[in-house]
Image (spheres, helix red, strand yellow):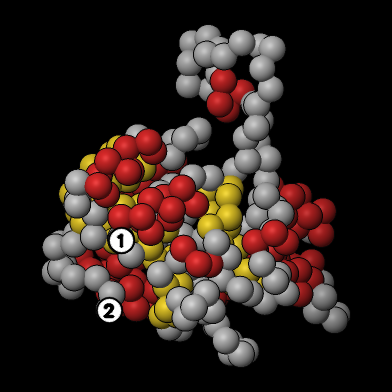
């Protein structure tokens, strides 16, 4: 069991919420006197409990985000932080889905999210499947759509949020944040409180997962699209500085950027 936990933890070293979930499951294994059959039942129960809590947290993230958005807004999102990533409502897409339940109509621009195309393969698919008006764009088009005044707000998820508000999310997120700041577009990070790591002081302390070179050079092509002699830098995530974030939205509250400070002396986020 502990080997399985460690294996799962190694798959996503940047995802703090994953470590919290695995920690809860591992705590079950420490139950005194519990046999194998009982532990299996307890683990299943803990998993169901975690799912229920996650659904509730995502719904509340959506409700809190709706206080900052208007019916008819056009949003831009990066990567996938919807139903396929975080049960039922997702995080960044929670206001879209919760809003739809309440009669809101949002239009969403989805960055394709190179190199693995989570925006094209996942976000665009699930939004279209839910009947949400969706526009797929290349990552390099984000500036053009913001410059044209097409975007009312950016909503993204997070894999880890440091104590100072620096946020790790899919590679390319920080570029979107820079563009949003330049064009005066609100940039919202939507994530459960379990994503905030109070022991991580800032973005420099967040481990960034490195991915294989072929994801950039060959994954989607019949033959490699770059010379074999070139080296490849392929981080899966980047750090968005707290200063570029308009607000961090959790299930508990909206935390606006207060001069680069989000959580103050709060012991609970």
Q: Is residue 108 left or right of residue 192?
A: left
Q: Quadrant of residue 32?
A: bottom right
The answer to the question of whether label 1 and label 2 lie on touching residues, with beta carbons closer than 8 A, is no
Query: Element at badge 1?
Result: loop
Give me the residue at 61% from left, 10% from top. 227
Judging depth in this view, the residue of 70 and 124 nearest the camera is: 70
The percent position of residue 261, horizontal first and vertical second, equals 54, 79
- Residue farthest to the right, as pictured: 33
Q: Quadrant of residue 198?
A: bottom right
Q: Is residue 22 left or right of residue 90?
A: right
- Residue behind mark 1: 184
Does residue 206 show up? yes
Give me the residue at 72% from left, 74% from top. 199
Q: Is residue 182 left or right of residue 144?
A: right
Does residue 46 show up? no
Which mark is nearer the camera, 1 or 2?
1
Give me the residue at 38% from left, 51% from top. 179
- Residue behind mark 2: 67
The percent position of residue 201, horizontal first and vertical second, equals 70, 71
């Amino acid at each position: 069991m502990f080997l399985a936990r460690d294996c799962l933890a190694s798959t996503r070293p940047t995802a703090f919420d994953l470590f919290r979930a695995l920690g809860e499951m591992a705590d079950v294994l420490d139950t005194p006197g519990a046999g194998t059959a009982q532990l299996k039942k307890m683990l299943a129960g803990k998993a169901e409990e975690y799912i229920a809590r996650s659904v509730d947290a995502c719904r509340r993230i959506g409700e809190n985000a709706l206080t900052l958005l208007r019916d008819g807004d056009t949003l831009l999102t990066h990567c996938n932080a919807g139903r396929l990533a975080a049960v039922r409502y997702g995080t960044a897409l929670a206001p879209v889905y919760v809003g739809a339940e309440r009669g809101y109509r949002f239009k969403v621009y989805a960055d394709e999210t190179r190199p693995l195309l989570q925006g094209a393969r996942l976000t665009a698919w699930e939004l279209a499947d839910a009947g949400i008006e969706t526009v797929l764009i290349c990552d390099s088009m984000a500036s053009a759509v913001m410059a044209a005044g097409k975007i009312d707000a950016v909503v993204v998820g997070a894999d880890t949020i440091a104590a100072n508000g620096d946020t790790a999310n899919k590679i390319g997120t920080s570029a979107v944040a820079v563009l949003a700041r330049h064009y005066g577009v609100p940039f919202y990070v939507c994530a459960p409180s379990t994503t905030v790591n109070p022991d991580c002081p800032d973005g420099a302390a967040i481990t960034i997962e490195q991915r294989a070179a072929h994801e950039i050079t060959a994954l989607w092509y019949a033959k490699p699209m770059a010379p074999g002699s070139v080296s490849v830098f392929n981080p899966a995530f980047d750090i968005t500085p707290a200063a570029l974030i308009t607000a961090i939205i959790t299930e508990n509250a909206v935390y606006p950027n207060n001069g680069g400070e989000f959580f103050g002396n709060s012991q609970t986020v």
